[in-house]
Amino acid sequence: MQKDRFGNPYADGLPYARGDILPTTIDDIAKLEVAWGHIRRRRAELGNDSVYLLSGLERNLQLDEVDLSIMDDEIASALFTGEVTKLGLDHLGGDPDRHDVFVFNRLTAALLTAADVMINAGDHVIGVSPRYSHPAVSRAVAHGGGAFTDTTGLGAFRQAVEAAENVDTVFITRLSVSYEILPEADIKEIVRIARGRGAKIIVDDAGGARVGPACFGQPKMLELGIDVGATGMDKYGTTGPRLGLLGGDKGLVQKIRVRAFEMGVEARQMLYPAVVQSLRNYSPDRVRERVALTKQVGAALNRRLGDNRVMETPVIVQLMADDILEMAMERAGMETAPCVPYEATAALAMLMLRDFGIISVHFAGLPPGTAALMIKFLPPDVVDRFGGPAALAKAVDDSLDALAATMKTDGGLKNLLLNAAA
């Protein structure tokens, strides 16, 4: 059983421990409602510009020209389905003679539905990623009735395949939740091994569909020789809204489309004009620009916190949850941890929002896929409006001080995370 640095065992299906303050997703939802209260208050008291969307995600509706007559499921379907297909195939590297695409209400729904169609009860599914598969993958496999074995990297994957009596499906995550990436050569070998065992291949390419090609020169998703894969339309270079773009073998996509309509998880077609604009305007340069800015913020954090506290991958910066709790305990002069690391991250994110208006990626997932505080793919205009990388790093540092003070107060953490009046 995996444990964090403080000896807390990881919760089932999550890469971190749950604590007494936020033990379930119900509590995560309550925490999010408290965060909404801070957003409402800041906008009412300080103006709309007092809130800074720094999650690295684009989850709004962007349309240069809004003709409300086309914002209708039937009209938009008729006018934009063809262009969505054309642009989607190009974005994912698809061949129109072999591949098709479909838009879901979110990436998780795309993975869930693909697994529902492609995985049968009792199937053995092996996941492979640079670190660990997202909970959305393991939940999708469980929903399909499969037995899931997760592996880290090519070597562990090879061993798992060799030890398995049968391998029915392989679930590849190119860019992990920790933002490490599988090398192209490893992906090709994983695909070769999977095909050699007769396995179907699904790819969770959440951010990898753009980060892989833009930052690492890797092939586009459907050029990897897989069956189906999906990416998020709110991630890294696209402009939203929060939808899931699935692409793959025409026959499989047809079956998945049918199941999506049956389950009610398809994207509302009235959003197709925004999908078209997002795909049409996508540029790899935007991804690289945001990575460069993120690195500048990382350098500013290094100067304040020390480089042993700031973890970097080639594309993002993060404060690990164990380090956040340790730093706050050091500043508070505490020897006994008052919470688990995940709750320390949640509290830090809440303080950054309450005191500085920073909406971090911690609030984007229920439950979050990681306990770390991720700083990634930052939009230059928002960072400039906040005051630049140094100002952002200072806000994080000041929030760590506030976290230390909160930890010393009886009931302070619970009040901060779950009391809307705090």
Image: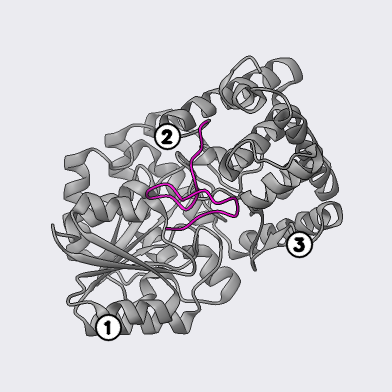
Quadrant in which residue 416 is drawn:
top right
Q: Which residue is mark 1?
A: 162
Could you give the CA–CA distance between mark 3 and mark 1, rounded to whole angstroms? 38 Å
Q: Looking at the image, which is closer to me, 409 or 165?
A: 409
Crowding at dot 1, Cα within 10 Å, few <14 / some 14-19 / many 20+, comes out as few
Say which quadrant the N terminus sits in.
bottom left
Can residue 52 be seen by looking at this rendering?
no
Q: Which residue is mark 2?
A: 25
Estimate the x, y position of residue 379 in percent, counting from the top left.
68, 49
SS at circle 1: helix
Could you give the CA–CA distance between mark 3 and mark 2, rounded to whole angstroms? 31 Å
Residue range (magenta): 1-20
SS at circle 3: loop
Residues at circles 3 and 1 in contact by the CB criterion of under 8 Å: no
**Residue 10 covered by magenta stretch:** yes
Q: Residue at x 65, y 32 (%)?
A: 350
Q: Amino acid at mark 1?
A: Glu
Residue 380 as seen in the image, left or right of residue 361: right
